Image: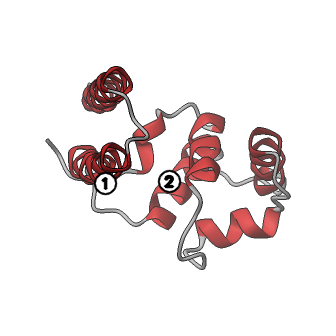
Amino acid sequence: MRRDDRTLAEKVDALFLERWPRGSRSATIEVAAFVAGETGRDIDRQYIYRIRAGKVRKVDGRVLEAIALFFGKPFGYFSANTDDEMAAVLRESKLQLAGLRATGDLTPEAHAELRELMDIARQVLRDEEAGRRR
């Protein structure tokens, strides 16, 4: 698997440059309006600019998902290494499942369904990664 070691800001900037190679005065306004509509949050052009410039340390996943959607990229576009990220999610979810089982809040059937959902999520991320490599 090929790693993409670019920073989040570099990835966002690359999307803008791909879409508007000569620049656009309204680019950040368009993206901000779309992201605000998708997330239901108050997102302005300055926030999008700050993400693009690397001035925002932690960006919410829903915001990143909306940015990727605006530019026609897959959900996992911003992930440097999808398998590493998915492994971390799986580790965390297993801990959460163990906690639910310990408290008796999760039936065996629900546990099996959640395990199946995690397998589906893992396959979706792999398919998206394979699509990026084409």
Quickly name the residue at label 2. Answer: 14
Label 2 crowd (10 A; few <14 / some 14-19 / many >=20): some
Q: Position of residue 86 (x, y in %)?
A: 28, 45
Label 2 – label 1 distance at C-alpha: 31 Å
Q: Earlier in the sequence, mark 2 or mark 1?
A: 2
Residue toward you, 32 or 114: 114
Image check: 13 left or right of 31?
left
Residue ID at (65%, 46%): 20
Q: Quadrant of the N terminus?
A: top left
- Residue 79 badge: none
Label 2 residue SS: helix
Label 1 crowd (10 A; few <14 / some 14-19 / many >=20): few
Residue 129 sits in which quadrant? Answer: top left
Quickly name the residue at label 1. Answer: 92
Residue toward you, 130 or 27: 130
Residue toward you, 25 or 38: 38
Q: Quadrant of the C terminus?
A: top left
Label 1 residue SS: helix
Residue toward you, 65 or 131: 65
Residue ID at (26%, 46%): 94
Amino acid on which disc 2 is placed = Ala
Q: Residue 52, relative to residue 4: is it above or below?
A: below
Foreground label between 2 and 1:
1
Image check: 125 left or right of 69?
left
Residue 29 sits in which quadrant? Answer: bottom right
